[in-house]
Image (cartoon, helix red, strand yellow):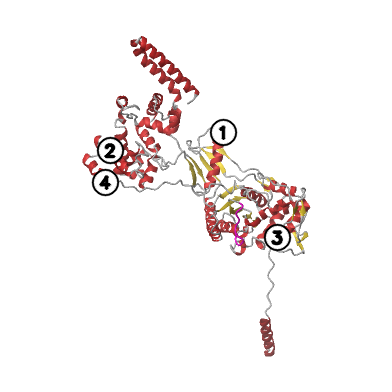
C-alpha cells in the first residue's frame, strides 16, 4: 500500500468514525450524509486505480521480438507463457460458456451488474458468501493484481469496480472478452485460452468443442480445486454445471446438455514447455541489454512491441548448434564410459562463438551444451584457463620487440624464479630435443620450453598488454611467467575477439556486436548501432607475421586435423589449447572473413577430461572443424580469400626411389638400344 493511499484510507476511516458518532446523535442526518461519504471515498480511490493510458497500453500490449540478420524470430519477450489469439480464433462454445457461467448479463451492463452485486451482498450478509464480480471486474483483477489486490475489503471491491468502469469506457465488449480469455491463468504455466487448449487438449483454441470449452471455463471458479488432471471428478462435476448454465441461458439445447453431461472427462494433457529458439543464449544476452536500454529510453520490453535486429546468421547458428551437439554427444559418451562406478555422473559443457573479424559482428553463439539444463553462458560468463591458445600473444609480443620467427632457442628444460622466490618449471608432453628450435616451430608445435624462455626474455607485462590491446579486456591477467602458458582465466568471448583482431590485420573493433538496431512495432528505427571505427592495436606487418606463423599450426602442427580430417584447404590459421590434467580444451580458427572458437570442459574445473580425448585438438577442434566445413559450403566465408601475406606453399614431395623399377627401366633402355 502506498503512503498516499494509506493517508486516504485513514481519512476515510476518520470520516466514518465521525459518521457513526453523527448516527448516534442524529440518525436522519447520518442517513443523508452516508452517500456523500461513500462518493467522497470513491473519488479519493480513483487516482489509485490504473489510468486510462495504462488501460490503453494493456489493450495493445505486444511483446518485443528478437530477429536474426536474415529475419528469423530468435525470441519473444513475454511477461508470461501466453500466445495471444484474437476473439475470432477462439471457439464459440468457449465464449458462450464464459458468458453463461460468469456473467450472463454481460452485454447489458457497463462493467458492474448492480442486480448481481446487490444479491451477492444480501447473500453474504445471510452467511452464504457469493461473488458478484462481472467479467469486466475479473479482467480488472487479472490485468492489475498488484494495484487492485485480492483482499476481502470494501476498498478492493471499490477499486475493482472503478477499474471495470474505466475498462468499459475504452474497450468494446468483444475486446473485453478477447483480453479476458487471453489473460486468465489455467495452471501449469499456461496463461490464456490458447495455451490452456494446448496444455489440456493438445489443440488450438479455435478447435475446442463444447465439452472441452465447458471444462476449461469451469476451472475459472478455482483452478486448483477444479484441476482436471489432479481432481477429475470435481472437474467433471463443475463441467456439467457449466453445461447446465449454458442450457439455462439459451446457449445449448437442454437435451444435448444432458447427453454431454454423461460423457467422461477426456484430456490430452501435456505441459507446454517454453520454446527457447535456435539461439537461446543470444536471446538471454540481448534481453539483458534491452532491459537496460529500454529503462533509459522509457520503453516496456513486454508491451511496446520493440523489434531488435541482431547480427546472427541463422545458417551459421544452426551449423554451430549441430556441431556442438554432435561432438558433445560423443564426448559425453566417452566421459561416461571412463567414469568409475562410485563417481557421480558429470555433464560436459561447451561454449562456441563465431565472429566476422571485418566488422566484429557475432554470427553464431552457443553458450552451453543444452540450454534447458544449463542457462549458464560459457561464452560470456565462464572464466577458464586458456592454455596454449594464449601462446600467440607471447610470440606476438616478441615480434613487436623486433624478434623474428626464425630466431632460435634451445629446446631444453627451463626453471624460472619469480619475484616471490617460487620456481616455475614447465614441462612438455615429449622430452626436450636439446637442439635449436625457431620461434615459428615453438608456436607451431606448442613447445612450453620455448614459450617459457620467450616470456622470460620479453616480460609477462608486455604479453599481458598485447592480450589486452587485442581484446582480453575484462579478465584480470596475472603478471607472472606462467601467464605465457595461459594460467590466467579468461572468457571465450575475449579470446575469440583477440583472434578476430589478429585476423583483421591487428585492428581492434571493440566488443563483439550483437544488436544492429531497435525498431518500434511500426518499423520506425529507434536506435541504430553502426560499425565501430577500427583502432590499430598491433602494427599490420607484425599481426600478419603472427598469423603467418599460426598458419603452420594448421598445416603441420597441433591443428593439422583441420586439413587431414575435415579437408579444409582454405587459408586458415589457429591454435589449440589444453590446460593441466585436461581440465579445459580449446581451439580457435581464423579466416579473413570468419573466426570461430570453442571451449570444452566440466563446470567444475577440478573434474578433468580423459587423456585420450580431453586435449583441445580432440575435444574442441572437431566442433570448429565441423562448423567451418558448413560455413565454407554456405559461402559464409569465401575459400578463395587469403590473408594479406603470401601463403607458404608446401614443397613438392621428392620422388620415392624404387630400385626394382629402376632396374626394369635400365634393362628396357638397353633392349631398345640393341634393337636400334
Q: Is residue 642 visible?
A: no
Query: Magenta residues, as a range?
Result: 605-613
> Cα distance, mark 1 to mark 4?
56 Å
Numbered disc 1: secondary structure: helix
Binning the other alpha carbons within 10 Å of mark 1 as few (below 14), some (14 to 19) or many (20 upward) gives few
Instruction: Give the percent coordinates (x, y) of residue 668.
Output: 66, 86
Residue 36 against residue 174 in the figure, above or below: above
Report if the CB atoms under discs 2 and 1 are less than 8 Å apart.
Answer: no
> Cα distance, mark 2 to mark 3?
79 Å
Numbered disc 2: secondary structure: helix
Residue that lies at the very extreme toward the front in this rendered image? 342
Residue at image mark 1: 296
> Cα distance, mark 1 to mark 3?
53 Å
**Residue at 48% of width from left, 36% of height from top?**
304
Residue at image mark 2: 241
> Cα distance, mark 4 to mark 2?
13 Å
Binning the other alpha carbons within 10 Å of mark 4 as few (below 14), some (14 to 19) or many (20 upward) gives few
> Cα distance, mark 2 to mark 1?
51 Å
Asked which quadrant contains residue 424, the reply is bottom right
Numbered mark located on residue 263 in the image: 4
Binning the other alpha carbons within 10 Å of mark 2 as few (below 14), some (14 to 19) or many (20 upward) gives some
> Cα distance, mark 4 to mark 3?
76 Å
Q: Nearer the viewer, residue 91 or 172?
A: 91
Residue at image mark 3: 428
Residue 280 against residue 295 in the figure, above or below: below
Numbered disc 4: secondary structure: loop
Amino acid at each position: 500500500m502506498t503512503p498516499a493511499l494509506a493517508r486516504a484510507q485513514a481519512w476515510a476511516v476518520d470520516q466514518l468514525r465521525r459518521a457513526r458518532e453523527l448516527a448516534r446523535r442524529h440518525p436522519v442526518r447520518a442517513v443523508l450524509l452516508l452517500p456523500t461519504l461513500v462518493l467522497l471515498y470513491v473519488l479519493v480511490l480513483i487516482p489509485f486505480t490504473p489510468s486510462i493510458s495504462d488501460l490503453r497500453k494493456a489493450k495493445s500490449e505486444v511483446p518485443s521480438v528478437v530477429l536474426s540478420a536474415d529475419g528469423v524470430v530468435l525470441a519473444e519477450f513475454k511477461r508470461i507463457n501466453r500466445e495471444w489469439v484474437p476473439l475470432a480464433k477462439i471457439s464459440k462454445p468457449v465464449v458462450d460458456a464464459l458468458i453463461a457461467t460468469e456473467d450472463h448479463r454481460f452485454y447489458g451492463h457497463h462493467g458492474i451488474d448492480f442486480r448481481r452485486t446487490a444479491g451477492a451482498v444480501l447473500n453474504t450478509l445471510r452467511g452464504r458468501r457469493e461473488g458478484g464480480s462481472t467479467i469486466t471486474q475479473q479482467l480488472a483483477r487479472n490485468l492489475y493484481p498488484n494495484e487492485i489486490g485480492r483482499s476481502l475489503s470494501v476498498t478492493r471491491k471499490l477499486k475493482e469496480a472503478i477499474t471495470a468502469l474505466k475498462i468499459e469506457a475504452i474497450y468494446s465488449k468483444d475486446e473485453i472478452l478477447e483480453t479476458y480469455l487471453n489473460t486468465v491463468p489455467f495452471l501449469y504455466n499456461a496463461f490464456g485460452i490458447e495455451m490452456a487448449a494446448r496444455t489440456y487438449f493438445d489443440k488450438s483454441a479455435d478447435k475446442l468443442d463444447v465439452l472441452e470449452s465447458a471444462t476449461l471455463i469451469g476451472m475459472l471458479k478455482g483452478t486448483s480445486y477444479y484441476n482436471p488432471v489432479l481432481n477429475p471428478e470435481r472437474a467433471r462435476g463443475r463441467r456439467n454445471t457449466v453445461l447446465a448454465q449454458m442450457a439455462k441461458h439459451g446457449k445449448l439445447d437442454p437435451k444435448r446438455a444432458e447427453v454431454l453431461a454423461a460423457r467422461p472427462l477426456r484430456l490430452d494433457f501435456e505441459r507446454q514447455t517454453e520454446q527457447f529458439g535456435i539461439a537461446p543464449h543470444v536471446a538471454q544476452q540481448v534481453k539483458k541489454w534491452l532491459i537496460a536500454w529500454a529503462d533509459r529510453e522509457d520503453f516496456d520490453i513486454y508491451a511496446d512491441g520493440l523489434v531488435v535486429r541482431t547480427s546472427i546468421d541463422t545458417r551459421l547458428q544452426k551449423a554451430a548448434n549441430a556441431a556442438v551437439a554432435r561432438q558433445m554427444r560423443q564426448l559425453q559418451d566417452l566421459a561416461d564410459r571412463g567414469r568409475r562406478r562410485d563417481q557421480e555422473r558429470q555433464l560436459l559443457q561447451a561454449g562456441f562463438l563465431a565472429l566476422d573479424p571485418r566488422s566484429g559482428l557475432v554470427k553464431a553463439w552457443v553458450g552451453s551444451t543444452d540450454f534447458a539444463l544449463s542457462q549458464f553462458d560459457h561464452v560470456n560468463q565462464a572464466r577458464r584457463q586458456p592454455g596454449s591458445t594464449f601462446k600467440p600473444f607471447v610470440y606476438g609480443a616478441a615480434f613487436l620487440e623486433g624478434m623474428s620467427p626464425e630466431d632460435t632457442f634451445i629446446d631444453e628444460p627451463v626453471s624460472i624464479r619469480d619475484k616471490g622466490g617460487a620456481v616455475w618449471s614447465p614441462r612438455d608432453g615429449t622430452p626436450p630435443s636439446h637442439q635449436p628450435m625457431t620461434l615459428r616451430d615453438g608456436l607451431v608445435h606448442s613447445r612450453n620450453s620455448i614459450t617459457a624462455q620467450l616470456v622470460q626474455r620479453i616480460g609477462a607485462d608486455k604479453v599481458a598488454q598485447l592480450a589486452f590491446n587485442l581484446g582480453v579486456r575484462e579478465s584480470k591477467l596475472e603478471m607472472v611467467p606462467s601467464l605465457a602458458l595461459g594460467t590466467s582465466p579468461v572468457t571465450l568471448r575475449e579470446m575469440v575477439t583477440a583472434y578476430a583482431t589478429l585476423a583483421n590485420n591487428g585492428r581492434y573493433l571493440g566488443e563483439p556486436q550483437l544488436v544492429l538496431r531497435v525498431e518500434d512495432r511500426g518499423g520506425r528505427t529507434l536506435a541504430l548501432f553502426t560499425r565501430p571505427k577500427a583502432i590499430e592495436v598491433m602494427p599490420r606487418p607484425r599481426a600478419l607475421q603472427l598469423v603467418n606463423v599460426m598458419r603452420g599450426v594448421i598445416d603441420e602442427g597441433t591443428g593439422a586435423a583441420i586439413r587431414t580430417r575435415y579437408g579444409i584447404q582454405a587459408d586458415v590459421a589457429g591454435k589449440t589449447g589444453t590446460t593441466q590434467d585436461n581440465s579445459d580444451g580449446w581451439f580457435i580458427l581464423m579466416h579473413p572473413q570468419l573466426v570461430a572458437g570453442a571451449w570444452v570442459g566440466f563446470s567444475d574445473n577440478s573434474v578433468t577430461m580423459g587423456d585420450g580425448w580431453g586435449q583441445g585438438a580432440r575435444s574442441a577442434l572437431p566442433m570448429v572443424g565441423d562448423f567451418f566445413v558448413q560455413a565454407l559450403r554456405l559461402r559464409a566465408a569465401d575459400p578463395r580469400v587469403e590473408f594479406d601475406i603470401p601463403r607458404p606453399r608446401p614443397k613438392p614431395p621428392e620422388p620415392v626411389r624404387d630400385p626394382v623399377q629402376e632396374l626394369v627401366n635400365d634393362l628396357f633402355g638397353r633392349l631398345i638400344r640393341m634393337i636400334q
